[in-house]
Amino acid sequence: MLNNEFLEYQKVYGNYYGTGIIETSELLREGKDVILEIDYKGMMSIKQIFPSAISIYIVPPSVESLRERLGIRGQDTDEVIKNRMKSSIHELLYAKFADYVVVNDDFTRASSELLKIILSTKINSCGVKTWLTRLTKIYN
């Protein structure tokens, strides 16, 4: 996009979405974790820039359940759902490139699994003792 202001950007279902370089860099400089909700193309771009970035692909339990969920939401026309389904089938093939895959078959279970991945990655990246020290400072 204009002036290379984005780490990644994509046109998704007719809308542009992107991750700003300045905002992301500032958060990383402050030592904060950055969680991005991006599509597979964005994931591949981010992994090229930040090879140590952890990617978590959240997938539906089946293509049929995805179609059902899109219909229940009531936000899209049948034509839009048809196009999204076609894209989704292709996008699901990229799950194999993610570091982790979480199947969103039950919200509570999937949320718990996501939290476990984030926490274990965080603990492993800085060491248990350092992580516990930081945690103690936050809650004291």
Image (cartoon, rainbow, N blue to C red):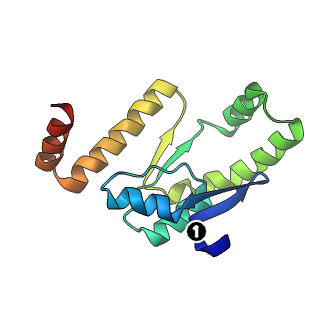
Q: Quadrant of the C terminus?
A: top left
Residue 70: percent from left, percent from top: 73, 33
Q: Residue at x 40, y 60 (%)?
A: 26
Within 10 angstroms of label 1, few (less than 14), some, or many (20 or more) residues? some
Location of residue 31 by image quarter: bottom left
Badge 1 marks a residue whose secondary structure is loop
**Disc 1 target residue:** 5
Q: Between residue 5 and residue 73, name the one nearer to us.
A: 5
Q: Residue at x 69, y 55 (%)?
A: 90
Indicate the position of residue 89 as horizontal and vertical percent values. 70, 50
Front residue of 33 and 77: 33
Vertical comparison of 108 with 15: above or below: above
**Residue 57: x, y in percent?**
51, 48
Q: Residue at x 39, y 56 (%)?
A: 27
Residue 114, quarter of picture: top left
Whole-percent x, y for residue 38 in the image: 57, 53
Front-lying residue, 31 or 36: 31
Would you place residue 140 above or below residue 17 in this image? above
Relative placement, left or right, of 74 versus 21 is right
Q: Is residue 83 left or right of residue 133?
A: right
User: Quadrant where the N terminus lies?
Assistant: bottom right
Residue at x-position 81% and y-position 40%: 81
